[in-house]
Amino acid sequence: MSLAPPERVLTRHALTGEWLSQALPVTELEYGPELSGPGELRGTLSPRLVASNPTLADPGTTEIFVESDGQLEWGGLIWDVRSVGSEYRIEAASWSSYLMHRYDLDGEHGGRGPYVYQDRCEVIRNIWTYAQSVPDGDLGVIVDNTTSTSKIGTPDDVHHSYWYDTKSLGDQVDDLVSDQGTPEYTCTTTWNADKTSVIKRVRLGWPRLGARRTDIEFSSGVNIIDEPEQTLSGDDYAQVVIGTGAGDGSAKLREISAVRNGRLRLEAAAAFPEINGRDVLKQRVAWERAVRQSMGRVEQVVIRDTPAAPFGSWQVGDDVYTRIHNQWTSFTGWCRVTGWTIQPTAPGGRQAAISLKPSAMYTHGGL
């Protein structure tokens, strides 16, 4: 997949499919995906252009796409257009953001639930099927047929989606992918083979998205162009985590994960009220402790396009070996790509700001 310039921004009516603009003049363009989230797009339009044709970027019903070198690299829905001085700034998010504006009005996802020992991937597909079965609600999003061994609901704790619940369908999906050992997703957009239609896809990953990459790396002096900030926070650190699960009072589930490592003992509490199994709670608390012990994180690097990691060579979820050495930071290790933002017109040329988390925070992929 090439990310070579020039970029072309297109907009389309979400229901009719009518193309509104096939070369929208957007400046200060930034766009990219994220792990288990929609990703976002930002840019600036001429107010004169918007005033003369407001349907070009009508929030809540206009799709926006970025094409680069003939390939669609990003797609989503415009949610916000506002005037700032002499400019109109637009903000968009990819396909999963739509579910934040939809609710289960019929209950049990239109009769597809309730759920007992149900694959979370199947529940996610049911949510999308329900949302797109309602009149004027079909975005044409395709959800992968991935299956997983991550289940939700038990005979003693059946998983429901009630019609009177005010939790959005998007929040329901977030609940299904927000824990350790659950599926992951990202949103993608591509042309079909003859470039006559758009394929909007929610990619589901199990046990994870991405892979450990030994063919690319992010390195100071090679492709990292800014000096990344390294976070050292004693407030967030703990080598003892007290985790609680379901239940009340003395019947509440509790697990403690602790190690001694020559540092002053620091403790943290974490609540997981949705967990009603002791083995699951034990695993979750141990994972939380591992996260808390990760001191000195590098959360973002800004890179240029080089053979060390050509633009388009990495994917959401990949683990990439990262080497950062400057007067403040000395970091070497595996980091997981949780998203990125392409900045086509950045000073000095096109660059990508890549969001990272320590790979040790993700253990369910055999890493």
Image: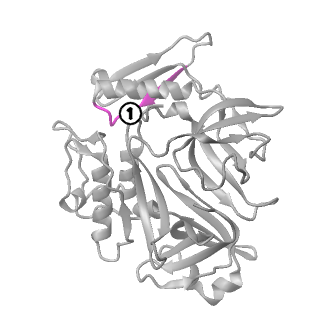
Residue lying at 67% horizontally and 44% vertically, measured from the top left: 300
Q: Which residues are magenta?
A: 267-276
Residue lying at 44% horizontally and 24% vertically, measured from the top left: 286
Verify whether residue 268 appears in magenta.
Answer: yes
Residue lying at 50% horizontally and 42% vertically, measured from the top left: 211
* The one of 244 and 304 positioned closer to us in this rendering: 304
- Whether residue 80 can be seen here: no
Residue lying at 34% horizontally and 77% vertically, measured from the top left: 136
On the image, the x and y values in percent for residue 155 come to: 16, 38
* The one of 247 and 328 positioned closer to us in this rendering: 328
- Whether residue 7 can be seen here: yes
Residue 247 vertical placement versus 112 (above, below): above
Which amino acid, by three-letter code, is at mark 1?
A: Phe
On the image, the x and y values in percent for residue 273 come to: 35, 34
On the image, the x and y values in percent for residue 311 come to: 65, 55
What is the quadrant of residue 87 in the picture? bottom right
On the image, the x and y values in percent for residue 246 come to: 30, 31
Q: Residue furthest left?
A: 155
